Image: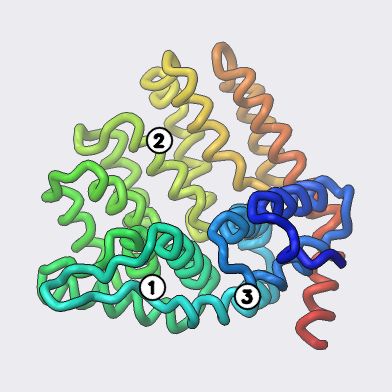
Amino acid sequence: MINPTIISVGNRAGLMDDVFSLARAGYLPQNLPLQIICYLSKEDDFLPWHAASRALYQLDKLLDRTEDYSLFSSYVLKQVELKYHKLDWPRVKAGDSFKQATYHTDELQREVIMLACSFGNKHCHRQAMSLVSEWISSNKNRIPPSIRDVVYCTGVSLMDEDVWEFMWMKFHSSTAVSEKKVLLEALTCSDNTFLLHRLLNASLNSDLVPDQDVIDVIIHVGRNPHARHLAWRYFREKWDELNSRFGEALFLNSKLISGVTEFLNTQRELDELKDFIQTSAAGGSASAFSRALEVVQANVKWHELYREHFFQWLRKSSDG
Protein backbone atom coordinates (compact mmCIF):
# COMPACT_ATOMS: atom_id res chain seq x y z
CA MET A 1 0.00 0.00 0.00
CA ILE A 2 1.18 3.54 -0.81
CA ASN A 3 2.75 5.41 2.08
CA PRO A 4 0.72 8.68 2.14
CA THR A 5 3.51 10.65 3.86
CA ILE A 6 5.57 10.67 0.63
CA ILE A 7 2.75 12.55 -1.17
CA SER A 8 2.31 16.35 -0.94
CA VAL A 9 0.03 17.73 1.81
CA GLY A 10 -2.81 18.78 -0.51
CA ASN A 11 -2.70 15.45 -2.33
CA ARG A 12 -2.70 13.54 0.97
CA ALA A 13 -5.92 15.30 1.94
CA GLY A 14 -7.38 14.64 -1.52
CA LEU A 15 -6.38 10.99 -1.38
CA MET A 16 -8.14 10.64 1.97
CA ASP A 17 -11.34 12.16 0.54
CA ASP A 18 -11.21 9.99 -2.59
CA VAL A 19 -10.56 6.70 -0.80
CA PHE A 20 -13.42 7.23 1.64
CA SER A 21 -15.85 8.35 -1.11
CA LEU A 22 -14.97 5.46 -3.44
CA ALA A 23 -15.23 2.88 -0.65
CA ARG A 24 -18.55 4.35 0.45
CA ALA A 25 -19.86 3.93 -3.12
CA GLY A 26 -18.56 0.35 -3.25
CA TYR A 27 -15.74 0.94 -5.75
CA LEU A 28 -13.01 0.11 -3.22
CA PRO A 29 -12.83 -2.46 -0.38
CA GLN A 30 -14.38 -1.22 2.87
CA ASN A 31 -11.20 -1.79 4.87
CA LEU A 32 -9.09 0.54 2.70
CA PRO A 33 -10.20 3.81 4.39
CA LEU A 34 -9.51 2.24 7.77
CA GLN A 35 -6.07 1.07 6.68
CA ILE A 36 -5.17 4.45 5.23
CA ILE A 37 -5.85 6.29 8.51
CA CYS A 38 -3.25 4.09 10.25
CA TYR A 39 -0.60 6.56 9.12
CA LEU A 40 -2.25 9.52 10.93
CA SER A 41 -0.01 9.26 13.99
CA LYS A 42 2.88 10.23 11.65
CA GLU A 43 0.89 13.06 10.03
CA ASP A 44 1.86 16.56 11.21
CA ASP A 45 -0.21 18.66 8.80
CA PHE A 46 -3.69 19.96 9.43
CA LEU A 47 -5.28 19.36 6.00
CA PRO A 48 -4.96 15.55 5.91
CA TRP A 49 -6.21 15.37 9.50
CA HIS A 50 -9.14 17.58 8.57
CA ALA A 51 -9.96 15.37 5.56
CA ALA A 52 -9.72 12.26 7.74
CA SER A 53 -12.00 13.84 10.38
CA ARG A 54 -14.60 14.73 7.79
CA ALA A 55 -14.58 11.20 6.41
CA LEU A 56 -14.64 9.57 9.85
CA TYR A 57 -17.62 11.67 10.96
CA GLN A 58 -19.45 10.57 7.79
CA LEU A 59 -18.78 6.94 8.73
CA ASP A 60 -19.66 7.66 12.34
CA LYS A 61 -23.18 8.79 11.49
CA LEU A 62 -23.71 5.56 9.52
CA LEU A 63 -22.50 3.40 12.40
CA ASP A 64 -23.30 5.19 15.65
CA ARG A 65 -26.51 3.25 16.32
CA THR A 66 -25.13 -0.20 15.43
CA GLU A 67 -24.45 -2.95 17.98
CA ASP A 68 -20.77 -3.13 17.05
CA TYR A 69 -20.16 0.61 17.11
CA SER A 70 -17.51 0.29 19.84
CA LEU A 71 -15.30 -1.68 17.41
CA PHE A 72 -15.22 1.35 15.15
CA SER A 73 -14.79 4.00 17.87
CA SER A 74 -11.99 1.99 19.53
CA TYR A 75 -10.18 1.67 16.21
CA VAL A 76 -10.39 5.41 15.54
CA LEU A 77 -9.19 6.22 19.07
CA LYS A 78 -6.20 3.95 18.61
CA GLN A 79 -5.16 5.93 15.51
CA VAL A 80 -5.70 9.29 17.23
CA GLU A 81 -4.20 8.54 20.64
CA LEU A 82 -0.49 9.10 19.93
CA LYS A 83 -1.05 12.48 18.29
CA TYR A 84 -3.54 13.49 20.98
CA HIS A 85 -1.04 12.93 23.80
CA LYS A 86 1.78 14.53 21.82
CA LEU A 87 -0.17 17.73 21.09
CA ASP A 88 -1.87 17.90 24.50
CA TRP A 89 -4.27 20.78 25.29
CA PRO A 90 -3.86 24.58 24.99
CA ARG A 91 -2.17 25.86 28.14
CA VAL A 92 -3.30 28.78 30.27
CA LYS A 93 -0.55 31.19 31.37
CA ALA A 94 -0.60 33.65 34.25
CA GLY A 95 -3.24 36.34 33.91
CA ASP A 96 -5.65 33.92 32.17
CA SER A 97 -4.12 34.55 28.76
CA PHE A 98 -3.75 31.56 26.50
CA LYS A 99 -0.39 30.40 25.33
CA GLN A 100 -0.61 31.08 21.62
CA ALA A 101 0.52 28.32 19.34
CA THR A 102 0.96 28.96 15.63
CA TYR A 103 -2.31 28.94 13.67
CA HIS A 104 -1.27 25.68 12.01
CA THR A 105 -0.59 23.91 15.33
CA ASP A 106 -3.69 25.43 16.91
CA GLU A 107 -5.95 24.06 14.18
CA LEU A 108 -4.35 20.62 14.27
CA GLN A 109 -4.58 20.51 18.06
CA ARG A 110 -8.27 21.42 17.90
CA GLU A 111 -8.97 18.77 15.23
CA VAL A 112 -7.27 16.02 17.25
CA ILE A 113 -8.96 17.02 20.52
CA MET A 114 -12.32 17.04 18.75
CA LEU A 115 -11.74 13.54 17.39
CA ALA A 116 -10.51 12.25 20.75
CA CYS A 117 -13.48 13.62 22.69
CA SER A 118 -16.04 12.65 20.01
CA PHE A 119 -14.91 9.04 19.89
CA GLY A 120 -14.66 8.60 23.64
CA ASN A 121 -11.07 9.17 24.82
CA LYS A 122 -11.36 9.11 28.62
CA HIS A 123 -8.55 11.62 29.22
CA CYS A 124 -10.22 14.03 26.79
CA HIS A 125 -13.55 13.59 28.58
CA ARG A 126 -12.01 14.21 32.02
CA GLN A 127 -10.16 17.30 30.78
CA ALA A 128 -13.32 18.79 29.25
CA MET A 129 -15.45 18.08 32.33
CA SER A 130 -12.79 19.59 34.57
CA LEU A 131 -12.76 22.82 32.53
CA VAL A 132 -16.58 23.04 32.61
CA SER A 133 -16.66 22.39 36.38
CA GLU A 134 -14.06 25.10 36.96
CA TRP A 135 -16.09 27.56 34.88
CA ILE A 136 -19.26 26.81 36.86
CA SER A 137 -17.57 27.05 40.27
CA SER A 138 -15.60 30.24 39.53
CA ASN A 139 -18.05 31.79 37.04
CA LYS A 140 -14.94 32.71 35.08
CA ASN A 141 -14.58 31.11 31.65
CA ARG A 142 -10.95 30.03 31.20
CA ILE A 143 -11.73 27.58 28.39
CA PRO A 144 -9.57 28.36 25.34
CA PRO A 145 -11.82 29.83 22.61
CA SER A 146 -10.45 27.48 19.94
CA ILE A 147 -11.88 24.41 21.71
CA ARG A 148 -14.93 25.81 23.48
CA ASP A 149 -17.37 24.02 21.19
CA VAL A 150 -15.72 20.64 21.93
CA VAL A 151 -15.50 21.27 25.68
CA TYR A 152 -19.06 22.61 26.02
CA CYS A 153 -20.54 19.74 24.02
CA THR A 154 -18.56 17.11 25.93
CA GLY A 155 -19.57 18.65 29.26
CA VAL A 156 -23.26 18.75 28.34
CA SER A 157 -23.23 15.17 27.03
CA LEU A 158 -21.46 13.62 30.04
CA MET A 159 -22.44 15.76 33.03
CA ASP A 160 -25.79 16.26 34.77
CA GLU A 161 -28.62 18.53 33.71
CA ASP A 162 -27.38 21.34 35.97
CA VAL A 163 -24.61 21.83 33.40
CA TRP A 164 -27.24 22.07 30.65
CA GLU A 165 -29.15 24.68 32.70
CA PHE A 166 -25.93 26.61 33.30
CA MET A 167 -25.19 26.71 29.54
CA TRP A 168 -28.81 27.68 28.82
CA MET A 169 -28.49 30.56 31.28
CA LYS A 170 -25.18 31.63 29.67
CA PHE A 171 -26.84 31.53 26.26
CA HIS A 172 -29.52 33.95 27.51
CA SER A 173 -27.03 36.33 29.11
CA SER A 174 -24.27 36.32 26.49
CA THR A 175 -24.13 39.29 24.12
CA ALA A 176 -21.45 37.85 21.80
CA VAL A 177 -23.09 36.33 18.70
CA SER A 178 -20.33 33.75 18.16
CA GLU A 179 -20.45 32.61 21.81
CA LYS A 180 -24.25 32.30 21.70
CA LYS A 181 -23.95 30.10 18.63
CA VAL A 182 -21.41 27.80 20.33
CA LEU A 183 -23.56 27.56 23.47
CA LEU A 184 -26.69 26.81 21.46
CA GLU A 185 -24.96 24.02 19.59
CA ALA A 186 -23.58 22.58 22.84
CA LEU A 187 -27.10 22.40 24.31
CA THR A 188 -28.02 19.91 21.56
CA CYS A 189 -25.37 17.45 22.82
CA SER A 190 -27.46 16.28 25.79
CA ASP A 191 -28.91 12.77 25.84
CA ASN A 192 -31.89 14.04 27.86
CA THR A 193 -34.80 14.08 25.38
CA PHE A 194 -36.94 16.25 27.69
CA LEU A 195 -34.30 19.02 27.64
CA LEU A 196 -33.81 18.66 23.89
CA HIS A 197 -37.55 18.90 23.24
CA ARG A 198 -37.64 22.01 25.39
CA LEU A 199 -34.76 23.46 23.37
CA LEU A 200 -36.48 22.68 20.06
CA ASN A 201 -39.71 24.34 21.20
CA ALA A 202 -37.91 27.36 22.65
CA SER A 203 -35.99 27.80 19.40
CA LEU A 204 -39.05 27.63 17.19
CA ASN A 205 -41.55 29.49 19.35
CA SER A 206 -39.63 32.42 20.77
CA ASP A 207 -37.52 35.34 19.59
CA LEU A 208 -34.52 34.01 21.50
CA VAL A 209 -33.07 32.24 18.49
CA PRO A 210 -32.50 33.77 15.02
CA ASP A 211 -34.07 31.94 12.05
CA GLN A 212 -30.73 30.60 10.76
CA ASP A 213 -29.97 29.16 14.21
CA VAL A 214 -33.40 27.53 14.57
CA ILE A 215 -32.46 25.33 11.62
CA ASP A 216 -29.06 24.58 13.13
CA VAL A 217 -30.66 23.50 16.43
CA ILE A 218 -32.88 20.94 14.67
CA ILE A 219 -29.96 19.67 12.56
CA HIS A 220 -27.62 19.38 15.55
CA VAL A 221 -30.24 17.52 17.59
CA GLY A 222 -30.42 15.14 14.61
CA ARG A 223 -26.64 14.68 14.73
CA ASN A 224 -26.95 13.46 18.30
CA PRO A 225 -27.39 9.66 18.03
CA HIS A 226 -29.46 9.67 21.24
CA ALA A 227 -31.88 12.16 19.70
CA ARG A 228 -32.03 11.37 15.99
CA HIS A 229 -35.56 10.00 16.27
CA LEU A 230 -36.60 13.14 18.18
CA ALA A 231 -35.31 15.58 15.52
CA TRP A 232 -36.82 13.52 12.69
CA ARG A 233 -40.23 13.34 14.40
CA TYR A 234 -40.13 17.02 15.34
CA PHE A 235 -39.28 17.98 11.76
CA ARG A 236 -42.28 16.05 10.42
CA GLU A 237 -44.70 17.31 13.07
CA LYS A 238 -43.65 20.95 12.58
CA TRP A 239 -43.11 20.78 8.82
CA ASP A 240 -46.02 23.08 7.90
CA GLU A 241 -44.82 25.69 10.37
CA LEU A 242 -41.18 25.34 9.31
CA ASN A 243 -42.06 25.45 5.63
CA SER A 244 -44.19 28.58 5.98
CA ARG A 245 -41.36 30.23 7.92
CA PHE A 246 -38.42 29.21 5.72
CA GLY A 247 -40.05 28.06 2.48
CA GLU A 248 -39.32 31.29 0.64
CA ALA A 249 -35.64 31.06 1.57
CA LEU A 250 -34.79 28.02 -0.54
CA PHE A 251 -31.24 27.81 0.79
CA LEU A 252 -32.44 27.62 4.39
CA ASN A 253 -35.16 25.15 3.52
CA SER A 254 -32.77 22.89 1.60
CA LYS A 255 -30.25 23.06 4.43
CA LEU A 256 -32.93 22.01 6.92
CA ILE A 257 -34.20 19.12 4.78
CA SER A 258 -30.75 17.71 4.00
CA GLY A 259 -29.51 18.34 7.54
CA VAL A 260 -32.30 16.48 9.28
CA THR A 261 -32.45 13.53 6.84
CA GLU A 262 -28.78 12.78 6.04
CA PHE A 263 -28.44 10.86 9.33
CA LEU A 264 -31.32 8.49 8.57
CA ASN A 265 -30.05 5.04 7.61
CA THR A 266 -32.58 2.32 8.48
CA GLN A 267 -35.24 0.80 6.22
CA ARG A 268 -37.90 2.03 8.61
CA GLU A 269 -36.61 5.63 8.38
CA LEU A 270 -36.45 5.36 4.59
CA ASP A 271 -40.09 4.22 4.53
CA GLU A 272 -41.05 7.09 6.84
CA LEU A 273 -39.31 9.56 4.53
CA LYS A 274 -41.09 8.15 1.47
CA ASP A 275 -44.47 8.37 3.24
CA PHE A 276 -43.76 11.90 4.37
CA ILE A 277 -42.77 13.02 0.86
CA GLN A 278 -45.98 11.52 -0.56
CA THR A 279 -48.26 13.19 1.96
CA SER A 280 -46.55 16.49 2.76
CA ALA A 281 -43.58 17.45 0.66
CA ALA A 282 -44.65 19.30 -2.42
CA GLY A 283 -43.94 22.59 -4.11
CA GLY A 284 -40.62 24.38 -3.86
CA SER A 285 -39.12 21.72 -1.60
CA ALA A 286 -39.55 18.83 -4.05
CA SER A 287 -35.97 18.86 -5.35
CA ALA A 288 -34.49 19.03 -1.83
CA PHE A 289 -36.60 16.05 -0.77
CA SER A 290 -35.62 14.16 -3.91
CA ARG A 291 -31.93 14.62 -3.04
CA ALA A 292 -32.63 13.63 0.57
CA LEU A 293 -34.29 10.42 -0.63
CA GLU A 294 -31.20 9.53 -2.69
CA VAL A 295 -28.92 10.06 0.33
CA VAL A 296 -31.04 7.93 2.67
CA GLN A 297 -31.39 5.19 0.05
CA ALA A 298 -27.58 5.17 -0.30
CA ASN A 299 -27.23 4.96 3.51
CA VAL A 300 -29.60 1.98 3.69
CA LYS A 301 -27.87 0.30 0.74
CA TRP A 302 -24.46 0.70 2.40
CA HIS A 303 -25.75 -1.08 5.50
CA GLU A 304 -27.21 -3.90 3.43
CA LEU A 305 -24.16 -4.45 1.24
CA TYR A 306 -21.08 -3.38 3.19
CA ARG A 307 -21.64 -3.10 6.93
CA GLU A 308 -20.93 -6.74 7.75
CA HIS A 309 -17.70 -6.78 5.74
CA PHE A 310 -16.66 -3.50 7.40
CA PHE A 311 -17.11 -4.91 10.90
CA GLN A 312 -15.53 -8.25 9.97
CA TRP A 313 -12.33 -6.42 9.07
CA LEU A 314 -12.47 -4.43 12.32
CA ARG A 315 -12.91 -7.62 14.34
CA LYS A 316 -9.90 -9.22 12.66
CA SER A 317 -7.90 -6.05 13.18
CA SER A 318 -8.74 -5.87 16.90
CA ASP A 319 -7.91 -9.59 17.37
CA GLY A 320 -4.59 -9.24 15.56
Cα separation, mark 2 vs mark 1, equals 24 Å
Per the image, label 1 sits on a secondary structure element best described as: helix
Q: Nearer the viewer, residue 226 or 258?
A: 258
Q: Is residue 214 left or right of residue 111?
A: left
Work out whether residue 266 can be spotted.
no
| Of the image marks 2 and 3, the number of the one nearer the N terminus | 3
Mark 3 lies on residue: 41
| Of the image marks 2 and 1, the number of the one nearer the N terminus | 1
Residue in view at x 33 percent, y 59 percent: 146
Q: Is residue 287 above or below residue 165?
A: above
Image quadrant in which the N terminus is located = bottom right
Cα separation, mark 2 vs mark 3, equals 36 Å
Q: Is residue 276 left or right of residue 111?
A: right
Mark 1 lies on residue: 158
Per the image, label 2 sits on a secondary structure element best described as: helix
Residue in view at x 52 percent, y 42 percent: 232
Q: Check disc 2: other Cα within 10 Å, few if <14, some if 14-19, many if 20+.
A: many
Find residue 215 and name its label.
2
Amino acid type of the residue that numbered disc 1 sits on in the rendered structure: Leu
Q: Position of residue 25 (x, y in %)?
A: 82, 45
Amino acid type of the residue that numbered disc 2 sits on in the rendered structure: Ile
Colouring style: rainbow
Place residue 123 in its image quadrant.
bottom left
Q: Check disc 1: other Cα within 10 Å, few if <14, some if 14-19, many if 20+.
A: some
Question: Do the residues bearing badges 2 and 1 touch, measured as CB atoms within 8 Å?
Answer: no
